[in-house]
Amino acid sequence: MIKTTFDKFITRNPKEREIFEKEYNDFLISEFVLQKMEEENISIRTLAKKAGVSPTVIQKMRSKNSEKITYRTFSNVLNTLGYKISIEKM
């Protein structure tokens, strides 16, 4: 199997891999929230009000700055959008 430069870089450097995985997860959260807000045609203020959080929290989630968002807050936002969090062993 041919490895890409990206694969070689990430596998060679565990610290870089950890940074990448964290940033990628933040990116996924942000993209998911953005997509679902668009699908539901819901504004930042409306989502924040329904989820019981400030509009700033929603803006952080949309801007890939979700590192300070608590599980409860994230769960409330997802529930408002019609989703729930599920944990499964990898």
Image (spheres, rainbow, N blue to C red):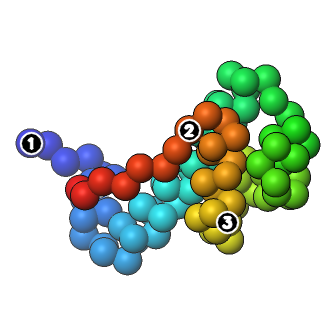
Task: Say which amino acid is labelled 1.
Answer: Met
Residue 59: in sight, yes or no? no
Q: Is residue 12 left or right of residue 76?
A: left
Q: Residue at x 25, y 58 (%)?
A: 89
Q: Residue at x 53, y 60 (%)?
A: 23
Say which element carries label 3.
loop
Q: Is residue 89 above or below residue 35?
A: below
Task: Say which amino acid is labelled 3.
Answer: Ile
Q: Residue at x 31, y 62 (%)?
A: 9
Look at mark 2 in the image and give the residue it sits on.
Answer: 83
Q: Position of residue 33 (x, y in %)?
A: 65, 41
Residue 67: in sight, yes or no? yes
Mark 3 and mark 1: Cα distance apart in space: 39 Å
Look at mark 3 in the image and give the residue it sits on.
Answer: 69
Along the viewing direction, whichever of 42 and 82 lies nearer the viewer: 82
Nearer the observer: mark 3 or 1; the answer is 3
Say which element carries label 1.
loop
The number of numbered badges drawn on the structure is: 3
Nearer the observer: mark 1 or 2; the answer is 2
Task: Say which amino acid is labelled 2.
Answer: Tyr
Along the viewing direction, whichever of 66 and 2 lies nearer the viewer: 66
Q: Residue furthest bottom?
A: 15
Near mark 1 (Cα within 10 A), the count class, few <14, some 14-19 or many ≥20, is few
